[in-house]
Image (cartoon, grey):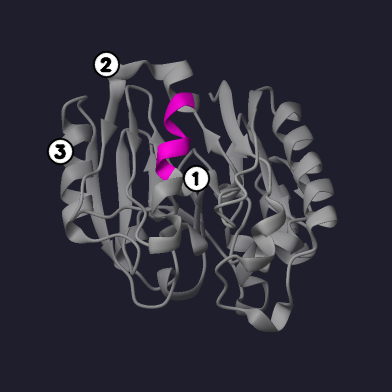
Amino acid sequence: MFKHTIVRRPAKSMTEGITSAPELGKPDHANALKQHDAYIEALKACGVDVLVLEALEDFPDSCFVEDVAVCTRACAIITNPGAASRNKEKDYIVDGVKRFYGEEKMAYIQAPGTLDGGDVMMVGDHFYVGLSERTNQEGIDQFTAELAKHGMTCEAVEMKEMLHLKTGLAYLENNNLIVGGEFITSPVFEKFNRLEVSDDEAYSCNCIWINDNVIVPAGYPKTQAKVEAMGYNVIVVDTSEFRKLDGGLSCLSLRF
């Protein structure tokens, strides 16, 4: 069960954030704030407390706090984001994470290793990490070594198409896994009870499980119906402004 979450308010500068889909247009900051408010309320409805950090105007993508830290049951690992414009965001998450873990339970990925939290999927004490444009093998090796100190394990996943591992995967506990795109045919995930997402609803692969609730993005009825059919309480949140920056539901929070 999760008890805590950390989020960061969207900066006005988010209009200059990284995107692979410029055709979606620039984010509307005012609407993004409203969507972020609703996201926070959805988290609270799942029974967790929410630490809300101030916006960082120098970092347009900094609302996507998932990429700068990985919070586990035993330790917190500050990452080393692979995108140059985002790398220093990690320095501004440390104090927030330390409130819950303390320095003795903190670790830090060091260059030349890179690691984005969006490439990390936790399944109990085993972690799948995508080898992507943002996360390299050195970063995964360092991450694996830190986990091993606490009796946890790690497995690298080759990727060819997705930005992040969790662009196409969402673990819903109880061996249930949302899969989309290149991961539908991946043998790595054969042992899971897989909920396959069609290409026309690919964005909805990025859902989040919190204490038997599943938060899903608005506008994807087929995925929503499949998750509901599995017996979860579903909460729908609109993240359309964050999609314009390649961001989804998991990207917007640290959950632990």
In the image: residue 248, left or right of residue 117 = right
Disc 1 target residue: 66
Q: CA distance from mark 2 to mark 1?
A: 21 Å
Q: Residue at 67% of width from left, 51% of height from top?
A: 227
Q: Residue at 30% of width from left, 66% of height from top?
A: 187
Question: In what element is the residue under mark 2?
Answer: helix
Observer-side mark, 3 or 2, equals 2
Disc 3 target residue: 145
User: Quadrant of the rendered structure where residue 125 is?
Assistant: top left
Q: How dense is the environment of label 1, judged by Cα within 10 Å: few (below 14), some, or many (20 and up)?
A: many
Point out the tag, 3 or 2, that comes first from the N-terminus. Answer: 2
Establish if 125 lies above or below 16: above
The kind of residue tagged 1 is Glu
> What's the magenta bit mostly, secondary-structure-wise?
helix
Relative to the observer, which residue lies in front, 127 or 39?
39
- Contact between marks 3 and 2 (CB within 8 A): the answer is no
Q: CA distance from mark 3 to mark 2?
A: 16 Å
Residue 104, labelled with which disc?
A: 2
Question: In what element is the residue under mark 1?
Answer: helix
In the image: residue 177, left or right of residue 90 = right
Residue extent of the magenta highlight: 90-95
The kind of residue tagged 2 is Glu
**Coordinates of residue 211 in the picture (x, y in percent):** 61, 29
Question: In what element is the residue under mark 3?
Answer: helix
Q: Residue at 55% of width from left, 53% of height from top?
A: 59
